[in-house]
Image: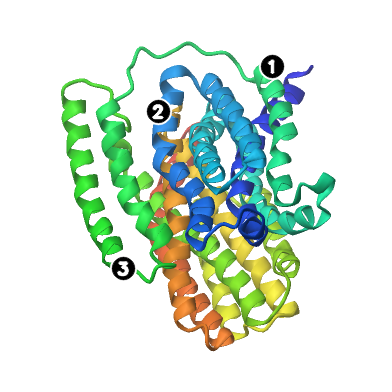
Amino acid sequence: MTTRLRQRWLLAVLVAGQFMANVDIAIVNVATPSIHRDLHASGGALEFVVSGYVLAFAMLIITGARLGRIAGYRRVYLAGLAGFTLASLACSLAPGTGALIGARIAQGACAAVMVPQVLTGIQVSFDGRARARALSVLVMTMSGSAVIGQALGGPLIAADAFGTGWRSIFWVNVPVGIVALAGAAVLLPRESREKARLDLPGVGLLTVAMALLVTPLAFGREQGWPAWTWACLGASVVAFAGFTAFERRLTARGGDPVINLRLLARPVVAWELTANFARTSTYFAMLFVLAQYLQQGLGRSATYSGLVLVSWVAAFGIAAPVTRRLPARAAPFGGVLGSLILAAAFAAVSAAPAPGPFLLVALGAGGFGLGMAYSSLLGRLTAAVPPDEAADLSGLVNTSAQVAAVAGVAVYGTVYFALAARPAYAFAAVTATLAASGFAGAACSLPSARRRAAEVSAVRGEERVPAQAR
């Protein structure tokens, strides 16, 4: 097998894990009515079936990234992928609601172990143009998988293959997981272990802080934001402050913190993660609100609401290779330009929210803008952070994305349902707010873009001086 072909297969087995994890966030939403009928699950239990996965995923991503740094991303990826496949099998065989909720939480925990290794593997296994191409594939996978989950769930359940019904959405993970495991075991390079220990007190503090933040965001909207949700959100601020103080003391003593806080002190990382949070929250909010608007507001089918997003996914995929080919002077501003395109697309949808060709075109523009911004983000951060800090970077990027997803659905979903008596007006109001978030993403990306542009200009100036001397 040639080196190039081996790298292609290596990338395929890495993004397979990302694909499976993302699909299982979205696909269960389509299956909840069938699960309710089959298992007689209550509304609260169905919330846990959906949100239990997201909670475990979001709370444990940074810990999963740290485990990859200590034990090697190959070992941890294989363990996470194997666990995810077994948990999917357990979901498909669940005899009751409690077993299904437990298996979904196990799925989320295994996804948190598996997913950070994907970006780490790309950063340490690829460089130069090969890394740029690999990141483009990862970007397309992350966007497409969420929409595919929504569009695939309905036909799978309707097919009712061998009488499996909703269980088929979990069965499909098993053969895919087995094939990916076999490929990963052969293709992923073996590594030496780091002489470091897992910071268990830090893991505990971080898990508590994330639980206090994500739990009310996941359940608050459905329950009308009772007092306990606000208490948890307030307590999360205290918990994160305590975690930060503990990690800083541990670092000062020469210990191994669960996350390298010095990464967040780098302006490029802080600004880009903030921009990514603003943009990612709009994407997941749009997935949720658009489905509510089309299905409940206008009476369209779940399949229709999934297919409407095809233009978004296709444009998102096109954006990655286009971003790679931007001129040297324009490339640093890819995140800013992408955010502005995203904001303009949401503004256009807000002005004309009716289903039709215009909506498809506007959603395509939004997908292109988000794809350009995200490709620029990954390229900028992986270039700015050395490979030995790849695990910490992966943990931060993935955690911010998961928290943004939950927060986006919670906040913008609340706004939509508050105005849902007039569906078109509610959808227009939410997309106008999403446009503002896109503009905020552009503003946050601008400092990093200016710094990168200055660096590129300085390098070009140094290259011209020797040429003139000759």
List the residue tagged with mark 2. Answer: 66
Q: Quadrant of residue 125?
A: top right
Q: Nearer the viewer, residue 98 or 440?
A: 98
Q: Is residue 333 left or right of residue 215?
A: right
List the residue tagged with mark 3. Answer: 226
Give the Cα distance between marks 1 and 2.
23 Å
Q: Nearer the viewer, residue 45 or 72?
A: 45
Q: Nearer the viewer, mark 1 or mark 3?
A: 3
Q: Quadrant of residue 121?
A: top right
The secondary element bearing badge 1 is classed as: helix
Q: Is residue 83 above or below residue 352?
A: above
The secondary element bearing badge 3 is classed as: loop
Task: Report if the CB atoms under discs 1 and 2 are less than 8 Å apart.
Answer: no
Q: Residue at x 23, y 39 (%)?
A: 243
Q: Earlier in the sequence, mark 3 or mark 2?
A: 2
Q: Position of residue 34 (x, y in %)?
A: 68, 58
List the residue tagged with mark 1. Answer: 186
